[in-house]
Amino acid sequence: MSWLLSGSRGVVLTAYHPSGGTGGGVRPGRGCARRLPPRRSGQYTMNHDDSKKIPDGVSFDRSGSQDSLDAMSMDDFWKEVENIHETRGNNHEEQQAIVVKEPDEGELEEEWLKEAGLSNLFAESTGDSQESMVFLSTLTRTQKAAVEKRVETVTQTLRKKNKHHQIPDVRDIFRPQSDPKGKVCDRSELSAEGTTESKNEMQDETKDMKFSLGTNEQKSPLEDMPFSETDINLEIPFAEQAANLKDNSVGKIYKDGGGDTLRTNFRLPKDKTGTTKIGDLASQDMKKVYSLALIELTALYDVLGTEFKQQKAAKIKTKDCGLFGVPLSILLEQDQKKVPGTKIPLIFQKLISQIEEATLETEGLLRIPGVATRVKSLCQELEAKFYEGTFNWENVKQHDAASLLKLFIRELPQPLLTVEYLKAFQDVQNLPTKKQQLQALNLLVILLPEANRDTLKVLLEFLQRVIDHREKNKMTLNNVAMVMAPNLFTFHGLGSKSIEQSEFVMAAGTANIMRFMIQYQKLLWTIPKFIVNQVRKQNTESQKKEKKDKAMKKLLKKMAYDREKHEKQDKSPNDADVPQGVIRVQAPHLSKVSMAIQLTEELKASDIVARFLSEKSGNVQTLKKEEVFLYEIGGNIGERCLDDDTYMKDLYQLNPNAEWVIKSKQS
């Protein structure tokens, strides 16, 4: 029997069994052979589309994503795989395998358009497509191309199936409003002439709103931005950056990996209008963020020539109670009855705290497994006693708790990274540069369901705390990534064939993805500024459309008149004379409920919060600075929690119609 592991960077694992039957395996590692768990007979050869078969043996190409891996760290990976097999061998209760559906022609693209919120472009009952038209008008050149490509595929499929409802021509969807209705453009005109004709209109709109989207209507956006090679540019759309790299004179560098090196440390430049984290925006704006992130990720993959496909699992019967092997949604439903508002499974939180209570300085933490029989027994006892509160945690050794934590992740009926996006996470390693890999990971994290994303965040934060004690526990970033990658990226629920494949295909690459997720977790939980700007533009355009509604026109006019009259009455003579501008900040839960704040060049959000908190009163509960935040509400955004370093004058210029409120995130 032979196994071939081949990834885009040239990692090969070969093991021969002369008998052709079941037997152990040889894995790479510092010149020594180790035994792997028994395998089924047969031959497993996994070749991805961009892989190349290289000579037998173990080879690490250190020029690409494998440059940070050595034989010792890879040995940790294979040890963890062996531990996982031992644990599964002791567990006789096999979970029902998830069947990944093979989509029919056009089905994948149709599902993609639904996910992007554009289903009314092809649905039989289109209804009012005004919202979609507003959405489409804010897309960049590469984003429009991604949508156009999927609409064309769905259109062709529907015509083949003899669907008789009206199918829009993709050229009509993206035709600028100034075009005559009878004019027909070809695809090249869509990306060139169409955008040129709407250039003046777009420039006027963006000038009024004082933000830009980095679209093709701008002149060489990358050249005008003072970003270094190690900066992650969140102002220009990622796909536009990739397209510029392909089009300009640095094509050779781009193909060779963009100059990525082993020790490159990427950073986020400070944004004067504030960094937006996942969780800072209201739900209605997060829906827009999700749609834009999906389109942007697809556009990035299209530009880079990498296939992006969401997988879809058939529905299966899962446990509706318990701890291990229970869907996250059901776990949280159970837990919220005991702890209202909790966003992370209680068992997951408890296992992490149990590990940390001992000490994070234990050598080999996470790498050294607990005793398999004891872990199985603890698992069964937890199922029976955890929610009753009768489980004795004093009997749980630290390595056993770590094994239970990893078991919890593996036993989820659907992977923590989801069936839909697990392969997309794995395929990130195929992107040409590390910077593009980080950009793709950023968008993928945004696309995860909230429960999965929140749980993943807690896990990565915990792993970083383990790494912080590396001098004592000997668990470096690479070591932790090697140990955790098999637990996050191998998923037994996808069936026996996938089990075999996922343990060996692109092993080092998935470990590098794990390393990136730990090292750059703060970056990955940031919503790119260009997406926030697109949300602002959508909100502004929607408001313009609403104002044109005849039914609302009279009411809006009266409201505007009353508001203007009220503001004139309240405004003092000094307010009108302040060239820097004045904002009124509300704080309904603090002793000082309202305050007029004069904007200066250096005034930050944290300064305003501190000024309010300094106004003490015995009648109001004392709040700590870290418990309250300044919010930007209304105008061109629904609601946004501001980070401490937001420069208020810059943000005011971006959204002059906003209201400013200090409150806690829970209120």
Image (cartoon, rainbow, N blue to C red):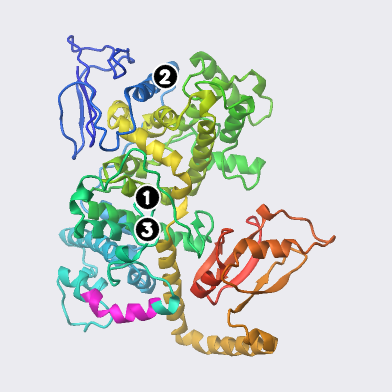
Q: Which residue is mark 3?
A: 227
Q: Which residue is mark 2?
A: 83
Amino acid type, callout 1: Thr
> Whole-percent x and y of residue 354?
61, 28
Q: Residue at x 85, y 60 (%)?
A: 618
* Disc number for residue 252: none
Location of residue 9 (image quadrant): top left
Front in this rendered view, residue 7 or 235: 235
Mark 2 crowdedness (10 Å alpha carbons): few <14, some 14-19, many ≥20 = many
> Whole-percent x and y of residue 184?
15, 77
> Whole-percent x and y of residue 176?
26, 77
Is 274 rendered above or below residue 452? below
Q: Earlier in the sequence, mark 2 or mark 1?
A: 2
What element does badge 3 sit on? loop
Q: Which residue is mark 1?
A: 230
What element does badge 2 sit on? helix
Q: Residue at x 57, y 25 (%)?
A: 361
In this rendering, would 143 be left or right of 416? left
